[in-house]
Amino acid sequence: MAFVFAIAPQARAQGGPPYYTNDPGTPGSNSWEINLGYMPFLYNGASTTHMPDVDINYGVGDRIQLTYENAWLRVKDGAGAAKYGVGQDQLGVKWRFYDDKKTGLGISIFPQLSINNPDQSVQRGITPPGASLILPVEFTKHLGPIDVNWEVGYNEVHLGPHGWLAGFVIGHDVSKKLELDAEFYGLGTFNNSNNQQTIDAGVRYKLRPPFILLLMAGRSVAPAFRGQPFFVGYFGMQFLLPPKPFE
């Protein structure tokens, strides 16, 4: 099963693509952040791949972000042929309601609704049967040369067990162009029927405006069986529009 899954002038943060943990950052007023990524989730005898994952964000003022995300999915289970189809539409609104420049602390909420398209993805076993609503809170904090970002949230699921999510990213800007990060991310259900925790590491590399290279690779904390992935990754590009010099 695949995981159900923005940098502002006011809030430096390490979360967001290529990582699963979100951060309080927003694109800025009338600005776009578009992320295109290849996302493999590999299991023993099965895989789900976003090829690509499309994540589009638009800034309304300096503290609000509108988000649309979806993916073209490749799902393979066992020796059968791979299935292809459109994933669920994910619609979100992020509001960074607290931003203290002196302490470097930022806090946001980011509700996201996932709904199925009017196609055959549910019947073919590509997407879950019901909608879901994620209600998370994001935090970011500067600790000297280190940026720390964490997220916790509740997942309300229609036609399925309700769940939770939690993520933690720590990162450092090695240079003006290169950022290195490490992440722990977990999600699951309250009945413990499908819990997954992963660890990963990644980089962001500023090529030239408006392009930022996004790379991440990791695996499950637990041994890779009973639904735990032996590899997860993100390989893609971020576009910041309109183009402007990097800070």
Image (cartoon, grey):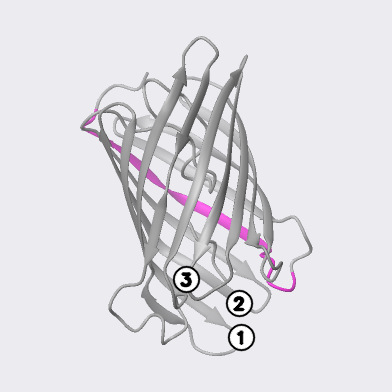
Look at mark 3 in the image and give the residue it sits on: 158
Mark 3 packing: few (<14 Cα in 10 Å), some, or many (20+)?
A: few
Quadrant into which the N terminus falls: bottom right
| CB within 8 Å, label 2 to label 1 | yes
CA gap, disc 3 and disc 1: 27 Å
Among all residues in the image, which is located at the extreme top?
102
Q: Secondary structure at mark 1?
A: loop
Look at mark 2 in the image and give the residue it sits on: 46
**Residue 78 position in % (x across, y down):** 61, 85
Q: Secondary structure at mark 3?
A: loop
Callout 2 amino acid: Ala
- 212 vs 218, left or right, is left
Please name whichever residue, 49 or 160, is drawn nearer the observer in this view of the structure: 160
Q: Residue 78: which numbered mark, if any?
A: 1
Name the residue: 60% across, 30% down.
Answer: 171
Callout 3 amino acid: His
| CB within 8 Å, label 3 to label 1 | no
